[in-house]
Image: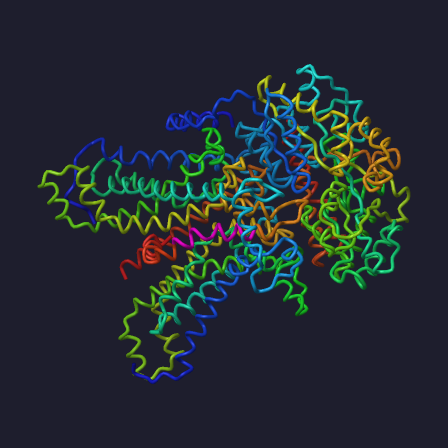
Amino acid sequence: MERRALFGGKLLPYTLLLPQFAIVVVFFYFPAGQAVWQSMLMEDAFGISTEFVGFENYQILAADPDYYKTMLTTAVFSILVAFLSLSCGLLLAVMADKQIKGATIYKTMLIWPYAVAPAVAGVLWLFMFQPSLGMLAKMLRSWGVDWNPLLNGNHAMILVVLAATWKQISYNFLFFLAGLAAIPKSVIEAAAIDGARPMRRFWTIIFPLLSPTAFFLLVINIVYVFFDTFGIIDSVTGGGPAGNTTTMVYKVYQDGKAGSNLGGSAAQSVVLMIIVIALTAIQFKFVERKVQY
Amino acid sequence: MSIGRNISRIAAGALFAGTALTLAVPASAQTEIQWWHALTGANNDVVNRLAAEFNASQTQYKVVASYKGSYADTMNAGIAAFRAGNAPHILQVFEVGTATMMSARGAIKPVADVMEEAGKLFDPNVYLPAVAGYYSTSKGEMLSFPFNSSSTVMWYNKDAFRKAGLNPDAPPKTWPEVFEAAKKLKATATPNCGFSTAWVTWVNIEQFSVWHNIPIGTKANGIDGFDTVFRINSPTHVKHFANLAELAKDKTYVYGGRTNTGEGTFTSGECPIMLTSSGFYGNVKANAKFDWGNAPMPYYPDVPGAPQNSTLGGASLWVMGGKSSNEYKGVAAFFAFLSDTDRQARLHTESGYLPITKAAYEKVKASGFYNANPYLETPLKSLNNKAPTENSRGLRFGNLVQIRDIWSEEIEEILAGKKTAQQGMDAAVARGNASLRQFERTVSR
Amino acid sequence: MVERQTLFARILPHVVLITGVCIVAFPVYLALLASTYDAATVQTGQMTLLPGNQMLQNYERILFSGTNSTTREPVGTMLMNSFIMAMVIALGKIAISLISAYAIVFFRFPFRMAAFWLIFVTLMLPVEVRIYPTYKIVADLQLLDTYTGLTLPLIASATATLLFRQFFMTVPEELVEASKIDGAGPYKFFKDTLLPLSVTTMAALFVIQFIYGWNQYLWPLLITTRDNMQTIVIGIKKMIVTQDALTEWQLAMATAVLALLPPVFVVVLMQKLFVKGLVETEK
């Protein structure tokens, strides 16, 4: 869509764009380019001696079993959070979509966790499950569960998944609610007249109509787990135990910390950049289709 | 990198010259000396009091102490700041970071030079040999200023010992005795924990090796050269971790985490035995609501020569490079202030860290302080237990901060039962060596 | 309704929703509880599900004097920093994106599409993939420990620019024509016509970006080195990772409550705008 009615002015549009451009070039493009350049260097911690090594950092990365473990961790983390937060969000949205009393209050009471910072969410869950003083940890122990997220990688993973899911449910809930509201009531009523049972009606009629929303949310949730859970991991587990909750983004941060392996960290950044580009492409391809639909 | 750095300066500088200028640090009559440290709790109070006392004692300089997180976080922050061109003047670096700092000659200024240039008297011989040796080059040049030195001791809860029918005045001496005592304690007094260790690698690998006179790595634990390889998969090491893993199954041994976050389980009474730094003293004194004591680290009696001697932990103060001579004068004045014998003696008796000068040690000893407080002398006795050997002089491995994380990961796998002790320690050696080689490659150029 | 609802069918949604609300609220309720007890009770796990009596003392202590064991900076200062950061980021993003979108939609000039793409592609460069180089640039500009360093690099916004662009494209052609006939130049049109039309979009965006700014973690973690520049989200993390002291959980939890209240208030009070902003930016 192009406009016909326009303003003239040669310099004005550039002036208007300048602030955004300046920031984008200085803080986005230049550092991104630096990351690519850095990924081909090997340096000591203080940056006193530097050697150009070409793709060696990438070769080291490709041969590092730890990196594959990190990828697997990220995948497991993403799948668990996406599955849990999507299904809880959907369940709550379906319930809140019914014409019931107090629907608005329920909605308000369910969406606020979106506003809680990931790091704070992490701390809240850590407090409940802190092995020696957490209320829920003590409960688990009294049931005979040897709860120990300090040592047990699965327990640590459960903890970060819970915190990440808790925060994300509200987002999914809202979008499912919007998706449900967009479904014409006549479609649902027609199905009801056909005598379909509520459960069957949901899976055969409503859910397929929601699937574009669900797919969109899936991509968003994966992006969320990739990037926004940094604060949760840093405050709850620090990537441990034994690297069992180290995601790809967390590893970039950890490996570059103290300048110990900036080259390797930068190489991982570049890999991440490629993944983000792919995710964004999928997301936009989808959004485009939804616009047509 | 310098080309990239310049381009970024020019490009960014051109765009934001105005902003940058207005936000430059405001001029001040006093010269500020930034001191980044990692001490919390009772020891954080000590740091702040030292800075305040120094600032009150003169008007020319102002020491600003900032807490920067854990030891590793503080070191990271210092390195990042150096790379960004705004390092603090004084950076507290824990003992594992020593090799990294020593190899960065362009980034640091040897403390001996700082003192000499400022015309302050600086004699390395006033320091306890174990302390001075740890922070000096092989030529005897002292590179950093020893601040809080500690060693590993075993803290124990005497009330819990009594409850378990153990003699509170005869703490276990050997590891098998510790295991037995821990089982009894867990069965009777403290159902959730028999014993625990903070700083899992420091206690169970580094100090453990030194105390048993077995090498952590070749080349005298790295002191004689960067081309060292690890030796921590010896039968003694493997046996120790196999024991810990076995005892971890029923919580006789409780893993206390990679740093000292687990120390709280001792002061809260949950764990009756805790192996950790002697610097824990201040917090034990302040927070433990029970009768407590400490004892030397345990050893395996079947290892010949054990116990040998323990080595240092804690941290030293590094002076970062690239500051003005006036600022270095301020640093020197502050260090001279810290070296004062009375102050050293007080620091030692209040914080539980070791006295670092001979004079302070003698003074505290003469005052009869140790008769009333024998627990502050335990680490000193361990340090001086025997004349140091090649395996117990100290250790100096590059990238040790990162390697400790690698080791911790492997230990966590062993304790979780995912790997056998042998597999875990073999992996710890292999992965540690890879990191050593990377360090060797980046520094030797 | 075509079918008769059974009692079960009528009650079920309420049961599910109430359960959901309780589960969602529970962690914050516990934090609130913990902040009303003294250290010893929390530390030994003796806390019950009813509040204690130390609430005032705890909040007063953290707000005005800070914790003992780590940073001595009072949480009041941190709250102020977070507030400034969130406000500057939200307003800055809106201002910058508004004028960028205005230029792209209402003007024709060489490289217009290139300009659009240049902004658009930044979507694919989240701060996490350029952490260290960005840190270095901010350091080179002497912006560490400044509000400028804390906010400026986060002010660019592809999503906001896209949102305004989309909105501007729906502005009826006739409005522009009418203004032009009235003799309005680009400035007058922007001020008198476009801005009033954009108020709701701006407000919705503000809600979302305020939360975004308030909740920043990695960036302030890297570039603030002074205690008095810390934001509250970073402050909490530091309270928990105390080394040789017991974590003062009752204070950490009080801080957590203070850290989550402002953005939660914004969401609850401006719920309509929040939902609009969320749906329209699609993150």
Q: Residue furthest left?
A: C181
Residue at the (88%, 37%) spot, across then down: B385
Residue B240 visible in this rendered orientation of the protein? yes
Overall secondary structure of the magenta section: helix
Q: Where in the figure is residue A118, as x and y percent of width and height?
A: 49, 52
Residue at the (73%, 43%) spot, across then down: B280
Residue range corresponding to the magenta coloring: C252-266
Q: Is residue C160 magenta?
A: no
* Closer to the camera in the image, A20 or A55: A20
Place residue A181 in its image quadrant.
bottom left
Q: Where in the figure is residue A282, as x and y percent of width and height?
A: 39, 54
Q: Where in the figure is residue A154, as x and y percent of width and height?
A: 61, 60
Q: Is residue A34 left or right of residue B402?
A: left
Colouring rule applied to residues: rainbow
In this rendering, the answer to whether B332 lies above or below B391 is: above
Residue at the (60%, 64%) spot, across then down: C48
